[in-house]
Image: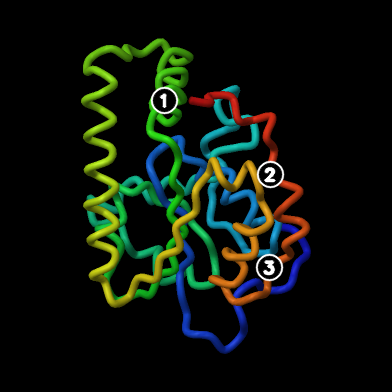
């Protein structure tokens, strides 16, 4: 763990920081940025970096069982950041407070990145048309965001992956403000790597 001061202000209400969005929307990069900025990350290292995510996936395996009722770990995650895909946000326990950084990326790029990942794994990618999947993704994101707006224990910051890569500093400042002004913005900026932006629309 990098030797940084605690990122969330001391004495603040205990919160769990969540990075979310569709798969392949830039969530792993945001996790790495927050780690560099000084926020402890909740990961287990069980999923190794590969050619689809050479900087690592930043996953915590128990997150995948949220919909099965595995929520006991959440209360111990105060002051840390954990990655939770958008489809699982509604299963986070309602008795905790969350600050969610929700990543947005052009849907066509998300699809292209997901297709390449499936191809690398030798899995089929043509079961449903891209236009239909894109419509489903857009509908899902709208539904999730509407749900989060109605949760009194959720505060949400939307971050556009494409805009972040094009001009990182304004978005880094917004993230830092959202989380209490205690992050190292310079270290966060050093993580942004346009060379990994390989599935442009």
| Residue located beneath label 1 in the image | 114
Tags 3 and 2 touching, CB below 8 Å: no
Q: Name which of mark 1 and mark 3 comes first in the sequence.
A: 1
Task: Work out how far the residue at label 3 is from the one at label 2, CA to CA, in angstroms.
Answer: 15 Å
Residue 191 at x, y percent in the picture: 71, 46
Tags 1 and 2 touching, CB below 8 Å: no
For the residue pair 114 and 50, the one nearer the viewer reads as 114
Instruction: Give the residue displayed 43% in from the left and 22% down from the top.
Output: 112
Q: Secondary structure at mark 2?
A: loop
Q: Secondary structure at mark 3?
A: loop
In the displayed structure, 113 sits above or below 67; it is above
Instruction: Give the residue displayed 42% in from the left and 31% down from the top.
Output: 110
Q: Secondary structure at mark 1?
A: helix
Give the side of residue 178 with respect to residue 32, left or right: left
Among the 4 quarters of the image, the one containing residue 3: bottom right
Task: Work out how far the residue at label 1 is from the one at label 2, CA to CA, in angstroms.
Answer: 21 Å
In the picture, which quadrant includes the N terminus?
bottom right
Among the 4 quarters of the image, the one containing residue 115: top left
In the displayed structure, 78 sits above or below 42; it is below
| Residue located beneath label 2 in the image | 192
Name the disc covering residue 183, or none: 3
Instruction: Give the residue displayed 43% in from the left and 36% down from the top.
Output: 106
């Amino acid at each position: 763990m990098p030797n940084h001061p605690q990122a969330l202000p001391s004495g603040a209400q205990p919160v769990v920081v969540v990075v979310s969005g569709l798969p392949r929307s830039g969530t792993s990069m945001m996790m790495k940025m927050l780690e560099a900025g000084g926020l402890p990350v909740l990961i287990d290292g069980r999923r190794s970096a590969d050619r689809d995510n050479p900087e690592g996936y930043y996953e915590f395996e128990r997150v995948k069982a949220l919909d099965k009722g595995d929520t006991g770990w959440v209360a111990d995650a105060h002051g840390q950041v954990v990655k939770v895909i958008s489809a699982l946000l509604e299963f986070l326990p309602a008795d905790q407070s969350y600050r969610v950084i929700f990543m947005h990326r052009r849907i066509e790029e998300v699809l292209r990145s997901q297709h390449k990942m499936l191809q690398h794994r030798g899995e089929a990618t043509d079961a449903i048309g891209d236009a239909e999947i894109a419509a489903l993704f857009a509908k899902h994101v709208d539904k999730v965001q509407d749900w989060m707006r109605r949760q009194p224990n959720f505060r949400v910051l939307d971050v556009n992956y494409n805009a972040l890569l094009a001009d990182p500093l304004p978005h880094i400042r917004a993230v830092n403000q959202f989380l209490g002004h205690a992050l190292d913005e310079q270290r966060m900026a050093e993580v942004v790597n346009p060379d990994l932006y390989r599935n442009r629309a």
